[in-house]
């Protein structure tokens, strides 16, 4: 099975074109979370057929579409999903925004676990809710949830909702069952709902494993997911949720209807259905390549930039670089100016001394990116 890296310049892509238009053609972008790989040929073939048909009228998600999702969670993630639990939407983040609106009131507090995916901050604040941070802590080189802090928070305030990144972007943890179970027990005790964003679920490196929050059997769990990350189709804007709780489902669907967001994009829905039925082998091949990139990026950083504190990405194609020891005011700006590498700024994740690197690019570019970072690193160490 062939994984093909593609030159994405001049395709109106945010990763390269938007950044180079702003900062110059010599910049090496290693930021936003999409990949430089061509999608599985089965998806392209299905698209070609659909394009040949030549009519792109209003569409709906078929029974096979929902079966594909239920089968995927059953077969890959070991949890049996009823088709009636599945909700639709234009992507994980818009679905999360709607859920925040129906499950909480303006002014309510919502827990997130920084350093974490920047839109988690935005979606809470822009919907006029307040953020309560339950920051991850570092134990033996690994980021873990601070469940004692979480219990203190839940016990002392009225928290209706916690948003979980599972696996965690940017620190790359594939949360273990025991950690999720403990979280579920706390949330059950204090009446808190969990939104488990599982968009990175399929990108996990052995020996680590993904565990869906559904496995805790906590009744107030809402899972959100999409084929966007695993199959490199986030620009097709399609998402889904798995919601065993009938009341949450009803509230969500009412909101989706109120905002007239029920009609899917033909290609987004088609990509998911084909991905989940025909592209498992492609995903396996992709994971092998990403695993090699992960090892290269991790080992290179540890060997050549030892003052940067880097947790091993157990999952995701993203690597978190804690640059606290470098004494830099703004590591993202520094690496842009001195290495000409564009990374995500840790400030957006709630940790200004960090940066996030995307290693889902061709190995030659990855090497260029890392050697450029190393040259800049040498200037300050
Ligand atoms: C944790 C997480 N959730 C959600 C998204 C975006 O999902 P969508 O494009 O479906 O809104 C991303 C993209 O990087 C992500 O990393």
Image (cartoon, grey):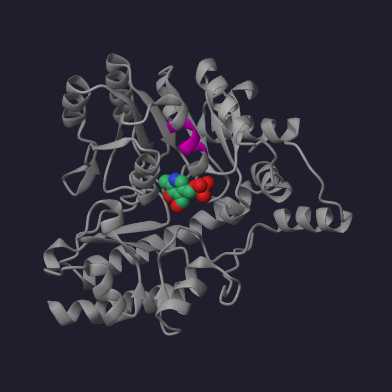
Judge whether residue 334 is colored magenta: no
Task: For residue 211, say whether it is visible.
Answer: no
Q: Position of residue 210 (x, y in %)?
A: 43, 38
The secondary structure making up most of the magenta span is: helix
Residue at position x 65%, y 47% from top? 275
In the picture, measured across the screen, residue 273 lies left or right of residue 316, that is: right
Above or below — where is 359 with respect to 69? below
Residue at position x 27%, y 75% from top? 335
Q: Quadrant of the N terminus?
A: bottom right
Q: Residue furthest right?
A: 53
Asked whether 266 or 72 is in front, the reply is 266
Above or below — where is 291 with respect to 28? above
Above or below — where is 66 with respect to 306? above
Q: Give the residues in magenta.
A: 95-100
In the picture, measured across the screen, residue 289 lies left or right of residue 121, that is: right
Q: Position of residue 278 (x, y in %)?
A: 69, 46
Judge whether residue 97 is colored magenta: yes
Residue at position x 41%, y 64% from top? 359
In the picture, measured across the screen, residue 150 lies left or right of residue 357, that is: left
**Numbered marks: total:** 0
Dividing the picture into quadrants, the one containing residue 12 is: bottom right
Task: For residue 111, say whether it is visible.
Answer: yes
Q: Quadrant of the C terminus?
A: bottom left
In the picture, measured across the screen, residue 34 lies left or right of residue 38, that is: left
Above or below — where is 229 with respect to 100? below
Q: Position of residue 55 (x, y in %)?
A: 86, 52
Asked whether 210 or 234 is in front, the reply is 234
Q: Position of residue 44 (x, y in %)?
A: 73, 58
């Amino acid at each position: 099975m062939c994984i093909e890296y593609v030159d994405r310049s001049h395709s109106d892509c945010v990763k390269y074109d938007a950044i180079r238009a702003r900062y110059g053609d010599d910049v090496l972008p290693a930021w936003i979370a999409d990949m430089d790989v061509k999608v599985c040929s089965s998806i392209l073939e299905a698209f070609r057929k659909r394009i040949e048909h030549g009519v792109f009228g209003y569409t709906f998600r078929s029974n096979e579409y929902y079966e594909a999702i239920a089968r995927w969670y059953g077969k890959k993630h070991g949890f049996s999903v009823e088709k009636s639990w599945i909700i639709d939407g234009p992507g994980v983040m818009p679905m999360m925004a709607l859920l925040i609106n129906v499950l909480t009131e303006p002014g309510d507090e919502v827990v997130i676990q920084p350093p974490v995916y920047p839109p988690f901050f935005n979606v809470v604040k822009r919907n006029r809710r307040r953020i309560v941070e339950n920051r991850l802590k570092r134990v033996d080189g690994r980021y873990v949830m601070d469940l004692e802090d979480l219990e203190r928070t839940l016990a002392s305030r009225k928290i209706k909702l916690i948003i979980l990144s599972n696996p965690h972007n940017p620190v790359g943890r594939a949360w273990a069952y025991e950690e999720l179970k403990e979280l579920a027990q706390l949330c059950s005790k204090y009446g808190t709902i969990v939104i488990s964003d599982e968009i990175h679920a399929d990108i996990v490196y052995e020996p680590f494993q993904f565990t869906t929050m559904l496995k805790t059997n906590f009744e107030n769990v809402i899972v959100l997911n999409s084929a966007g990350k695993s199959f490199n189709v986030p620009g097709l804007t399609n998402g889904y949720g798995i919601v065993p709780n009938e009341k949450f489902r009803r509230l969500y669907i009412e909101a989706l209807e109120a905002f007239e967001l029920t009609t899917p994009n033909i290609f987004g829905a088609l990509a998911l259905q084909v991905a989940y039925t025909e592209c498992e082998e492609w995903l396996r091949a992709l994971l092998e390549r990403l695993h090699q990139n992960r090892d290269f990026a991790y080992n290179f950083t540890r060997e050549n930039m030892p003052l940067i504190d880097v947790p091993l990405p157990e999952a995701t194609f993203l690597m978190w670089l804690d640059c606290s020891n470098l004494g830099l005011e703004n590591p993202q700006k520094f690496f842009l100016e001195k290495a000409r590498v564009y990374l995500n700024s840790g400030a957006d994740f709630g940790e200004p001394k960090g940066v996030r690197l995307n290693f889902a690019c061709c190995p030659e570019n990855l090497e260029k990116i890392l050697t450029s970072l190393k040259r800049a690193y040498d200037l300050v160490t």
